[in-house]
Amino acid sequence: MEQHTTPAEDQTHEAASEHLIVTPTFEAGDGALYVHKDLVKVREPWAEAEHIGPIDEAERFGDVESWAGYLGRFGKRPLVTWNAEGLHAVLDYHSDDGSPNRCDWWADYPFVPSLEWEAWMQLASGAAVGHRKAVEFLEDHSPDILEPIATDLMGLLRSLRANVTANAQTELRPDGTTNVSFAENKTVSGGAGHVALPSEITIGIPVLKGHIDEAGAAVNYRLTVRLRASVDDGAHLSLRFSIPLAERVLEDVYAERIAKARELVSPDIAIWRAAD
């Protein structure tokens, strides 16, 4: 028997065909990828596994020699900058055609202060340090002291004593009033009387960790430490230390490390100074 469809049923079929869902892609078990319309293969088997993504590395080194060796091995067109934090190199800064890369491959050599530098900088802040605490610090760091001889300096500082004397003078004025004036004398003396306290101490310490010479020994720098003594009203003796040329010494050390980096990597390498 011949069947006929109503106009409403025809519209239903048309609507269904307009919303037909077809899977746009098919991925085989071996990784091959087929894309609709005719499921044409557009990716070879195992191609995804063979893909090597862009480098994303950030390396940190403890000395400039290791840092420069890494750049010499992997750096083609690195962007190298420096500031008070250290040396920073972006190894994938430019590709062969000069266009920027992702810039996610770094090599850093941070300027890390030595333990000796940090200890002396904390002492030489210009703040008053108690007599006993100052003597204990100098005893613990006596190998750093070059001048005067550490044992002589310790003996001198241990013998220090503080004295405070106050005098009052009265003056009777013609009008019957009395003027009273006070004079206070603060002195520092040693066991056998007055002592000549040195105004400066010369020390030799490394400034940066990992800064060594060709023999593998730490590179020391001579620094002048100013020493001042003061006595408060309670006859308490305190010492003040300062290193006036600390910033200049730091700049010299940074300049030496940068020159060494340029020598080890390439004399023609551009090392830019970045903002601190």
Image (tube, helix red, strand yellow):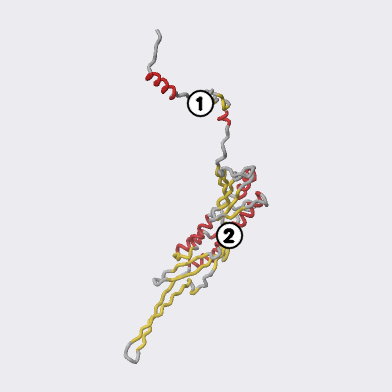
The residue depicted at 58 percent of the width and 30 percent of the height is: 50
Q: Position of residue 125 (x, y in %)?
A: 48, 63
Q: Quadrant of residue 58?
A: top right
- Asked whether, in this view, residue 60 is left or right of residue 185, the answer is right
* Mark drawn on residue 179: none
Nearest the viewer among 165 and 63 is 63
How much space separates mark 1 and mark 2, taking CA atoms?
A: 62 Å
Q: Position of residue 45 (x, y in %)?
A: 57, 25
Quadrant into which the N terminus falls = top left
The residue depicted at 62 percent of the width and 43 percent of the height is: 95
List the residue tagged with mark 1: 25
Q: Position of residue 60 (x, y in %)?
A: 56, 46
Q: Residues within 10 Å of mark 1 (few under 14, many from 20)?
A: some
* Mark 1 or mark 2, earlier in chain: 1
The residue depicted at 57 percent of the width and 38 percent of the height is: 54
List the residue tagged with mark 2: 251
The kind of residue on which mark 2 rests is: Glu
Q: Quadrant of residue 4?
A: top left
Q: Is residue 163 above or below residue 266?
A: below
